[in-house]
Amino acid sequence: QVQLAESGGDSVQAGGSLRLSCVVSGLTHNRRCMGWFRQAPGKEREGVATIYLSDGRVDYADSVKGRFTISQDNAKNAVYLQMNNLKPEDTALYSCASEPVLTSNYCYPRRYFGDWGQGTQVTVFS
């Protein structure tokens, strides 16, 4: 059973940076798509970024391109989301998700994910 645990959420001033962490346990292979999602109150959940663990291919939502970077550390079984130049509209509950897929072609922010963490809150104030 795959388990995901996020951390790193905080309150930060606009223009600041945060790094979110997602520690993954229970993986038996690295043919997995890992994703970061966010949901603000009253809004639909949005896929922010994905990474395919086997080859490191990444993909981003247009709203965060150039500001957010997703990465992996296989030794620590972790996936990170580096967020720079944060804006108030980035305020949301950020969650990590995982889904087994055959190739990186099936790893993108708008796909289905079956395993989810509890989330970590990010608040950006102006």
Image (cartoon, grey):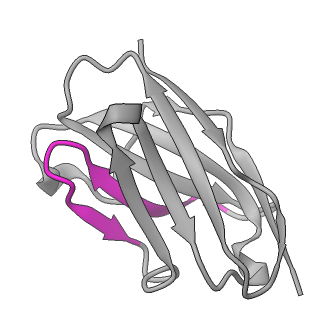
Q: Is residue 46 visible?
A: yes
Tell me, yes or no, whether the highlighted magenta stretch contains residue 85. no
Residue 19, position as x, y percentages in the image: 60, 60
Point out the residue furthest to the top here: 1
Of 101 and 7, which appears nearest the observer?
7
Say whether residue 120 is left or right of residue 98: right
Q: Is residue 38 above or below residue 89?
A: above
Residue 92, position as x, y percentages in the image: 74, 62
Q: Quadrant of residue 77?
A: top left
Point out the residue furthest to the front here: 75
Q: Is residue 111 above or below residue 78?
A: below
Taking the spot 60% from the left edge, 54% from the top edge, the residue there is: 20
Residue 45, position as x, y percentages in the image: 61, 57
Q: Is residue 45 visible?
A: no
Total numbered circles? 0
Say whether residue 44 is left or right of residue 58: right
Residue 122, position as x, y percentages in the image: 76, 60
**Which quadrant, please, contains the N terminus?**
top left
Residue range in magenta is: 44-60
